[in-house]
Amino acid sequence: MAEPRRSRRTGGEAEGARWPVVALVWLVLVVSLASLSSLFLGAGWWFAGAGVSAVVLGASGLVRSLRGSPWLAWLVGLLAGTATATAVVSGGTAVLGVVPTAATLQRVRDLSDQAALTISDGTAPVPVDDGVLATVVGAVLVVSLLVDLLASVGRLPGATGLFPAVVLAVPAFVPTAETRWPWVVATVLLYLLLLMVSSGRRPTPAGAVGAVAAVAVAGLVTSLVPLGGVSPLTGVASGTGLATGVNPIIDLGDDLRRGAPVSVLTYRSSDEQGTYLKLVDLVDFSGSSWSPADVELDPDATVDVLPEAPGVDADTTRRAVETQVTIGVLRSPYLPVPVPPTEITGIDDGWSVVDESGVTVRSDDESTQGLEYTVRSRPVDPTEDEVVATLGDAPADMAPYLAVDGVPATVSEQAAAVTADAANPFDAAVALQDWFRDGDFTYSEETPVDQGYDGSGLDAVETFLRVRSGYCVHFASAMAVMARTLGIPSRVAVGFLPGESTGFADDQERTVSSDDLHTWPELYFQGLGWVPFEPTVGLGRPQSFLQETGVEPTAAPSDPAEASPTPTAEAPATTGPDAASATPSDPARAAGSSGNAAVAVPGGLAALLVLLVLALVVPSGLRAGRRRRRLAAEPPDAALRAWQEVLDTAYDLRLDVPRSATPGAAAEVLAAHLGGGLGGRRRHGSEESRAALDRVVTALTTERFAGRPAEADVGRDARRVVDALRASSTPRRRAAALLAPRSLWASTGARRPRRA
């Protein structure tokens, strides 16, 4: 009669615990999701993600409560979650709002590109546009389906903690994000409650101590280890120095606002006024951001032989400058060099020349920190007559440096108005520079953040020209875009200002800090090459030859197809919300996005891989250590420890051993599983393993009640029973026992009887 009562109680507990487990699995997931609040603005993204997750888990739980199979329940959750996510992100492209179509899939791809640009251009917290929302909803949908797969089909609700653990770790790897500790603690406590409810047992004191210790260690690691300096775009830890990625403009604003400046390099130069040091040229402009040209490095293009600066006539006057550079804490894949360099000594062949957009130097596997090298450069310094002589020269094919579509009319109209009196393109460029420096513009690192236009895209340029306050990124981007609307090839350079001078005469040295990180536009003129301009008010110095000539060009370009006419206010024919997706610059944008994603993979993927390995290895390692200690225990508790291991192994394998059963009754239940396995599986030494089980129970009885120490081989007998129980279980149960041993959190081992 006792057995039926036990069965009814067990079944009732299982039925009653189903919805609480579903609710707790959902709560653990969405509460951990709330810890990402430092990454995104607002809370709409969280409600959308929580809603999709609730639909997936709720639909699956409803089918299971109606006696549907776990796989059917999971499939229903998949369909319901997909329909809900489609309703959120489809933008009217889905049938009845919930059935995705080919147009829906294309919209998802477009939103994914949009999200990549938003995340790469912005700093946490980023605004939640349609692309970011779609990314969050899609990620939550996938995670919810995986969680339901583990919890309902795999019957491993404890293993679902892997996903919240990954989510909780994300802010630690984003430089400008903060860890939201209240949500971290709430997630951990809810996860412990989930373990209790799903197992039907209270956690052991050791398990509770371990959980508290885990939270404490996580707090120490997050607080003391500079994980926030690990850029998801570069995989380079910033520490206390300055780290730049393949596209340094992405984090330039944050670096300028970092507080106390950090000295990054020193140099000595034959130019008494100092020199700008360039890192990289940004060529491709998608309308949303500037990015470097997508160029594969040629390992044979070492710095032993540098190419000539493009577009410079042989008779143009040039200065000879020698610069000796010592890098401190700067870590960058680009080498800071005066331009245009003609000779570089002191670095190895791990550095290659990037000459698609001028001569810059980059490495795919080395960093600048600690380098000492010498650069000889020859910047142009033309006379006015030499400038005038180049005005009628036919321009080179500069199509990549003229691509700019979807420019707001206000921007092109402003460019045309500023340069209305310019006699030639060179004078127009000088007029633009002077307008920025001599007009009503002010330098501010905070105004763009406060007013929401801290970026380099067209929206930011348009707002900047209206507000007339920003820092170097806004000045450089605005002038480069305006120059392109005038038919002048342009690009944006990222590097450093000349820095501050220290010492005197021969001991004069210049120190460059993080505050000197800078951007400036470079405009191309045939005969002069790429000419640096300085539109940022209050910073740097324009070159002395940048003066208007007032001379009309003496010759027209020889090939009209290679020249870009100065547009009127109506010139941008593709302005509007659909222009970005319809322009030829989309491939460049896609290339830039994929490049950033490729760089993001090493750091982010490595972190996720480490977390995954820890989640899989740590529980099994702890469990194996406990097993070794128990089976090697010495008298007077050798039999007790061996019996505890047998019971915990059965619990890990999901074998139904009543908690209140005596050793003899428990042994009868276990013996049934040693009779050849579940479902008619092959027998595994059943007679020997049953005999070993009997000897363990006998040793336990004599040890606890007769006061005689157990024989030394009780541990070997327990090992034989443990191996037989595992062999008679299904592969799924063995895998669950290995990767997610339940006994770590709720041990079923027998307790020592109290002694008088």
Image (spheres, rainbow, N blue to C red):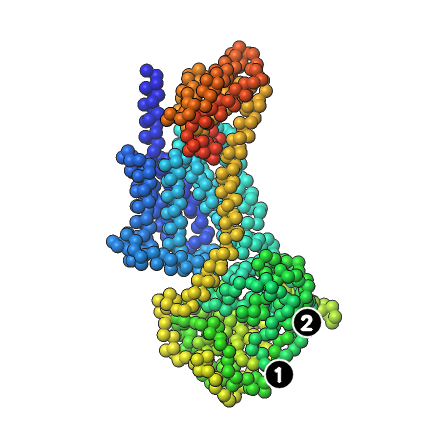
Determine the residue positioned at 44% across, 72% down: 403
For numbered disc 2, what is the local secondary structure? strand
Q: Residue 218 or 301: which is nearer the viewer?
A: 301
Amino acid carrying label 1: it is Asp
Res 283 label: none
Q: Position of residue 594 (x, y in %)?
A: 46, 59
Q: Residue 175 or 743: which is nearer the viewer?
A: 743
Which of the two discs, 1 and 2, labels the residue nearer the N terminus?
A: 1
Q: Position of residue 11 (x, y in %)?
A: 33, 26
Amino acid carrying label 2: it is Glu
Q: Residue 726 or 174: which is nearer the viewer?
A: 726
Visible residue check, residue 670: no
Left or right: residue 7 versus residue 391 is left
Determine the residue positioned at 45% across, 34% down: 735
Q: Residue furthest front?
A: 682
Q: Is residue 137 above or below residue 744?
A: below
> Gap between marks 1 and 2, in whole Å?
21 Å
Res 315 label: 1
Q: Quadrant of the N terminus?
A: top left
The residue pinned by badge 2 equals 322
Q: Position of residue 613 (x, y in %)?
A: 51, 41
Visible residue check, residue 137: yes
Q: Are marks 1 and 2 in contact (CB under 8 Å)?
A: no
Determine the residue positioned at 68% across, 66% down: 345
For disc 1, the neighbor class at 10 Å (few under 14, some 14 to 19, many from 20) is: few
Q: Residue furthest left?
A: 96
Q: Position of residue 61 (x, y in %)?
A: 32, 38
Determine the residue positioned at 48% across, 22% down: 721
